[in-house]
Image: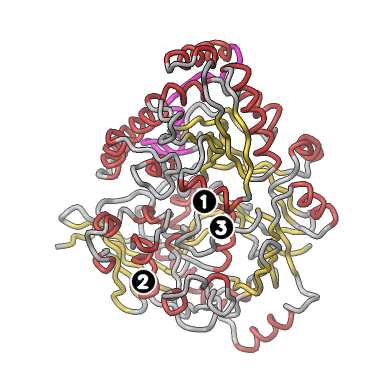
């Protein structure tokens, strides 16, 4: 028997408090905002284009139209919404697909949560402790080939995500859905997942608990719908324009591998007439010098990477913008490796990292030395406006420059306890990183610190992005560069990834005590109890087991051509270019 507690209208005004969670602000909404729904509905009605309007807009999309060119990274590993696990791929997917909710511009270049494919939803608490969300899809939403988007498309896609056969790293993003645990374990069929299309316009999702960040989950690329008739039995569907059918504002026009992915306006998108660029070209580069040269020549309108030696100059000139970024750059140890299975060795390698030196002399983009894994800006139990998770959790080691030598002395003592006094007898080990100027220079700094302070030899190995990702995922490394950006504003996004056999658990880490704390956090909706369990989990991860060596908390450098306006951004790392204009 379901007892209705509250009705939430997912519209701009009623979700602003929620969306600020991903920007360091508030969490969920508790009231119905009828006026906001009516406003949204009216706006939708105005944006429904006639065939004549579409023809006009298509005419404007000629070669002389507004064609934006941006560079995020090199060739993406995957642009299948279920299989992508990188920020660059997610940005591209956000332009070609859309979830039940979406990120929109608040008018100041910051992203806030708003209605996406669903115009509203209802949330009800049930007597058995489960929670039911009922999403109502917009009228007239279509795929890029003109076929209607239905609730059944979402049901199929979520069950595909949970299915172990899909092998999605991000399958656990919907682990709050009733039946997920059994499906993921292979003990139940995907059809038992509590996601159901009531009719073409109504999707029902039952959660095992009241997940505080669920409204952000449905704006996350892994939960975006895909077309069963295009995906089923076709592993190559993302590579063909004919089968890469999306429901977002843009659609794929061309993919020239290792060169660019070009997208064009989707004439079937409900907000088509308000879109900006006729085409967006995502240039695929991994050479920061080439990126900067292309930007300076006008070939690129936007870049987020440039040679590290150039950072101070562009910061001083004001051309480089530094945005907030909820993420951590860190070293990942393979806990199954013969050398790094010893937590004493992992801790020794972590302690001798001079984090101040790296942010001041190597990365140089305003990063903050990391004192834990979960970064500053992630909410704790009291929520926005109170101490964040990092402040409450404290420091796991001192980053005070005056304490660096003491850290090194402790590290040398730990290495001696592990059987390698002054590094004697320690085998040569390898540090793996993906090809990029900043990763190379950080790797060289780490190599030098480990050599000077511990007396060990570390070789460096760089690999192309896709090869690197696969080797790190499979555990084909000893030490590897790593980084994690929040998927939503909650410590869970940083901590549940280290659960035994987790899809993004690149450290190959397993500790039943750690898993128990994650389970405890996910078993309750009481904020204080959740955070107590998450803090205990981070204690195990960093203080006890030293699985990772956090280096710094990210910032997001980027440069946008001065004649382009309308780009917006969320500290989750997503840039949105679909509503930009040329001045």
Disc sitting over residue 545 in the figure: none
- Position of residue 6 in the picture relative to residue 429 (left or right): left
Q: Name the residue tied to disc 2.
A: 156
For image coordinates 65% across by 29% down, the residue present is: 359
Q: Nearer the viewer, residue 43 or 398?
A: 398
- Quadrant of the image occupied by residue 540: top left
Q: Residue at x 40, y 59 (%)?
A: 167
Circle 2: is it few (<14), some (14-19), or many (20+) Cα within 10 Å? some
Judge from the rendering whether residue 200 lies leftward or rightward of residue 59; answer left or right. Answer: left
Residue ID for mark 1: 470
Q: In this view, does 460 lie above or below 501?
A: above
Callout 3: few (<14), some (14-19), or many (20+) C-alpha neighbours within 10 Å? Answer: some
**Residue contact between numbered discs 1 and 3, judged by CB atoms under 8 Å:** yes
Mark 2 or mark 3: name the one nearer the start of the chain. Answer: 3
Q: What element carries label 3?
A: loop
Q: Give the range drawn in magenta.
A: 378-402
Along the horizontal axis of the image, is 568 left or right of 339?
right
Q: Nearer the viewer, mark 1 or mark 3?
A: 1
Q: Which of marks 2 and 3 is in front?
A: 3
Q: How is the image coloured?
A: secondary structure
Q: Position of residue 124 (x, y in %)?
A: 26, 59
Give percent across and percent down for residue 33: 40, 61
In the rendered image of this protein, does residue 404 appear above or below residue 177? above
Q: In which quarter of the image is the C terminus?
A: bottom right
| Circle 3 residue | 77
Q: Distance between the residues labelled 2 and 3?
A: 23 Å
Percent position (x, y) of residue 374?
46, 35
């Amino acid at each position: 028997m379901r007892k209705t507690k509250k009705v939430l209208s997912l519209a701009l005004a009623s979700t602003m408090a929620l969306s600020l969670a991903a920007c360091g602000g508030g969490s969920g909404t508790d009231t119905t905002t009828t006026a906001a729904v009516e406003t949204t509905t009216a706006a939708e009605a105005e944006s429904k284009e006639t065939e004549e309007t579409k023809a006009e807009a298509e005419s404007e999309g000629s070669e002389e139209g507004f064609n934006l060119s941006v560079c995020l990274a090199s060739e993406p590993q995957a642009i299948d919404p279920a299989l992508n696990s990188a920020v660059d791929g997610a940005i591209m997917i956000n332009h070609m697909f859309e979830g039940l909710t979406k990120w929109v511009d608040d008018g100041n270049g910051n992203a806030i949560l708003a209605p996406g494919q669903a115009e509203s939803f209802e949330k009800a608490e049930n007597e058995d402790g489960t929670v039911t969300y009922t999403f109502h899809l917009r009228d007239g939403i279509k795929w890029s080939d003109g076929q209607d988007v239905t609730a059944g498309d979402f049901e199929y896609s979520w069950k595909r995500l949970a299915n172990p056969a899909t092998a999605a790293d991000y399958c656990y993003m919907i682990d709050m859905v009733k039946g997920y645990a059994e499906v993921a374990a292979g003990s139940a069929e995907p059809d038992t997942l509590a996601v159901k299309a009531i009719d073409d316009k109504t999707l029902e999702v039952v959660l095992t608990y009241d997940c505080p960040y669920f409204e952000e989950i449905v704006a996350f690329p892994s939960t975006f719908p895909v077309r069963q008739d295009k995906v089923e039995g076709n592993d190559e569907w993302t590579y063909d324009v004919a089968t890469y059918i999306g429901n977002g504002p843009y659609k794929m026009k061309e993919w020239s591998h290792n060169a660019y992915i070009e997208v064009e306006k989707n004439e079937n998108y409900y907000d088509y007439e308000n879109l900006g660029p006729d085409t967006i070209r995502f240039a695929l580069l991994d050479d920061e010098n080439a990126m900067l040269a292309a930007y300076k020549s006008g070939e690129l309108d936007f870049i987020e990477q440039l040679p590290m030696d150039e950072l101070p100059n562009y910061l001083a000139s004001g051309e480089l913008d530094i945005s907030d970024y909820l993420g951590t750059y860190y070293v990942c140890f393979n806990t199954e490796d013969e050398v790094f299975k010893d937590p004493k060795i992992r801790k020794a390698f972590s302690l001798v990292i001079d984090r101040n030196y790296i942010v001041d002399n190597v990365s140089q983009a305003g990063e903050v030395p990391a004192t834990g894994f979960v970064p500053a800006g992630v909410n704790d139990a009291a929520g926005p406006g109170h101490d964040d998770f990092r402040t409450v959790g404290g420091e796991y080691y001192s980053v005070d420059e005056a304490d660096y030598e003491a850290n090194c002395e402790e590290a040398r003592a730990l290495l001696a306890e592990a059987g390698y006094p002054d590094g004697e007898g320690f085998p040569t080990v390898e540090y793996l990183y993906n090809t990029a100027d900043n990763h190379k220079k950080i790797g060289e700094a780490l190599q030098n610190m480990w050599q000077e302070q511990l007396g060990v030899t570390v070789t460096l190995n760089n690999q192309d992005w896709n090869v690197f990702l696969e080797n790190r995922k499979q555990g084909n490394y000893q030490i590897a560069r790593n980084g994690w950006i929040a998927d939503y504003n909650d410590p869970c996004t940083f901590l549940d990834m280290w659960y035994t056999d987790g899809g993004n658990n690149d450290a190959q880490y397993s500790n039943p005590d750690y898993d128990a704390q994650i389970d405890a956090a996910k078993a309750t909706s009481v904020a204080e109890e959740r955070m107590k369990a998450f803090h205990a989990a981070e204690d195990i991860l960093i203080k006890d087991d030293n699985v990772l060596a956090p280096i710094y908390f990210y910032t997001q450098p980027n440069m946008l051509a001065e004649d382009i306006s309308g780009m917006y951004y969320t500290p989750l790392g997503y840039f949105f270019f679909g509503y930009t204009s040329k001045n």
